[in-house]
Image: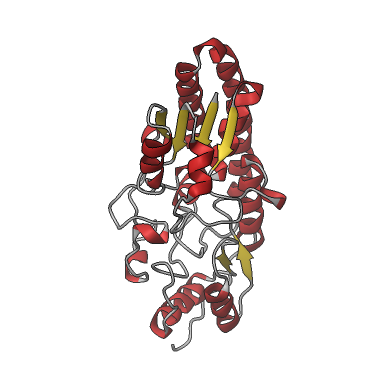
Amino acid sequence: MKVAVTIFPVYDLVRRVAGPDADVVLLVPVGRSEVGFAPASREAEEVRGAKLGILVGLGLDEWMQDLMGRAAPNARRLSVGDRVPSLASSRPSPRASNLAAEFSADAGVLSEGSPDPYVWLDPTRAALMVKAIAEEMARADPSRAAGYRRRSEELTRSLEALDRELESRAASWGSRSFIPFRPVFAYLAERYHLEIPASVVGPAGAILSASREREIQEVLRTDGIRGVFREPQLPPEPALHLGEQAGVPVGVLDALGGEGEADSYERLLRFDMDALEKVLKAAPVQPFKGEK
């Protein structure tokens, strides 16, 4: 059985459930952002002959529906985002709506109030996704259902262990707030009791305006936040500029992974927690009490 999957974190879960019993193909190449991705002839050829297509849904990769309709119209489809509790696309901090421009689907984040599609960044939700993946693969390929279910149980235990590990690490941190490049880490923040008071950029391609820069620097100053983050698949200049102007280091948070230190789902989450730990483990810098 051929199974087509849109993005790497879900692909890694699917291929491990599949084991030797299915051929799993990844559509968004490693190193590419999900932002503004448009499938071409390569992706259509990859999907051709698939019996199952797996996407996140929730507005993130809806191009997959049209692609499957053209290249594999009889294939089953699974939107894993529909199988887990979702958050609204809003800011975890009450202040944040005053600090950021509205986000849009082509920026990788839906407008405020729509479901946040970055569900995989919480291992407990990923475990629910794994169960849904195994059951859909079993329906598409009943003769190998036992293998899919057995491997999904093994993977679920790995995700449960990962969650316990990350929860224990985060509990020891002296700070709880961080500023990512985009506010796509809300599920990670919710699961480990962290806060995202602001993010570096608004809509895709937006310039970091002087007023927005001042607002974020104020958050850095008043909250004692020790750093900001960029994403490896997106232009680094806004985050690097903000870090230079604020005098704080710029780390890397990766929502997609797929290579290097983030070449599996668990390694992706550990990569992000390592990056956060460098900024959050120490107690926050004491806020400045003088005149602004």
Position of 5 relative to 214 (above/below): above
| Residue 200: image location, x then y, percent | 47, 70
Residue 17 visible somewhere in the drawing: yes
Classify 211 as above or below 80.
below
In the rendered image, residue 36, in percent from the top left (x then y), is placed at: 43, 59
Identify the residue shown where x is 52% and y is 40%: 45
Snapshot colouring:
secondary structure
Q: Which quadrant of the structure image shows residue 136?
A: top left
Q: Position of residue 29 (x, y in %)?
A: 58, 50
Q: Nearer the viewer, residue 51 or 188?
A: 51
In this rendering, position of residue 197 left or right of residue 279:
left
Foreground residue among 163 and 13 = 13
Q: Is residue 57 visible?
A: no
Quarter of image, res 99: bottom left
Q: Position of residue 28 (x, y in %)?
A: 53, 49
Task: Name the residue: 49% across, 17% down.
Answer: 138
Q: Is residue 28 above or below residue 214?
A: above
Which quadrant: the C terminus?
bottom left
* 26 or 189: nearer the viewer: 26
Q: Residue furthest right?
A: 260
Q: Quadrant of the N terminus?
A: top right
Q: Quadrant of residue 173?
A: bottom right
Q: What is the number of callouts on the image?
A: 0
Residue sitting at 42 percent across and 27 percent down? 75
